[in-house]
Amino acid sequence: MSEILETEAEALDHFPTTPKDISHVTFYFDATPDDREDDSFFFVKVETPDQVNDDLDAWYEAALEAMLARDPALADYELVGAAIKYGSARSGGGEVYFDLDNDPTDEDYPPTGGLVQGREFRSYEGGTTYNYDDLF
């Protein structure tokens, strides 16, 4: 079993149910988990339809399995958290990062120093984007 899935099996409640529809989720992977430094990251962004379950805990493990099947190199990385974008700025939405710490009540500070957008993936180890329907 990959290190990603072993980490995920340890805890079940990392993310809150969002008050608005999830627009997308960006998963943050530590690309060098053994070096004890948080300076090398890989990202996977998942664009979601309106009808997706607004509690990421309900589907992120299945998404990780699908991502791993498409990109086996992810097995060398460690999932450290995810940024959830929901709603819009006008409707009271936003984008919030959560560590995989089994505490869905606290918003965490991203290990990159700020939220990373898709156009910024190349400034790190890279990243990719999937549509939710392509994973499931």
Image (tube, rainbow, N blue to C red):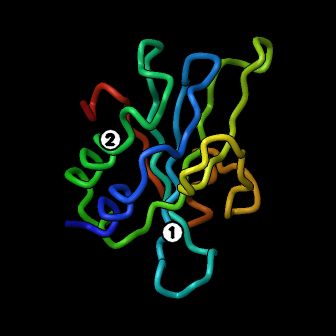
Going from the N terminus, do you reach mark 2 or mark 1 first? 1
Instruction: Answer above or below: position of 22 versus 3.
Output: above
Q: Amino acid at mark 2?
A: Ala
Give above or below for 30 relative to 36: above
Q: Secondary structure at mark 1?
A: strand
Q: Quadrant of the N terminus?
A: bottom left
x 62%, y 31%: residue: 85
Q: Secondary structure at mark 2?
A: helix
Q: Nearer the viewer, residue 9 or 136?
A: 9
Left/right of residue 91 with respect to residue 87 in the rendered view: right
Specify the quadrant of the image occupied by residue 106: top right
Q: Position of residue 56 (x, y in %)?
A: 47, 34
- Residue denoted by label 2: 63
The residue that appears at 61% across and 82% down in the rendered structure is: 37
Residue 85 drawn above or below residue 13: above
Residue 119 is situated, as x and y percent measured from the top left of the image, at 61, 47
Query: Quadrant location of the C terminus?
Result: top left
Residue at 34% in and 62% down? 4
Q: Position of residue 87 (x, y in %)?
A: 66, 18
Residue holding disc 1:
30
Q: Residues within 10 Å of mark 2 (few under 14, many from 20)?
A: some
Quadrant of res 74: bottom left
Marks 1 and 2: in contact by CB < 8 Å?
Answer: no
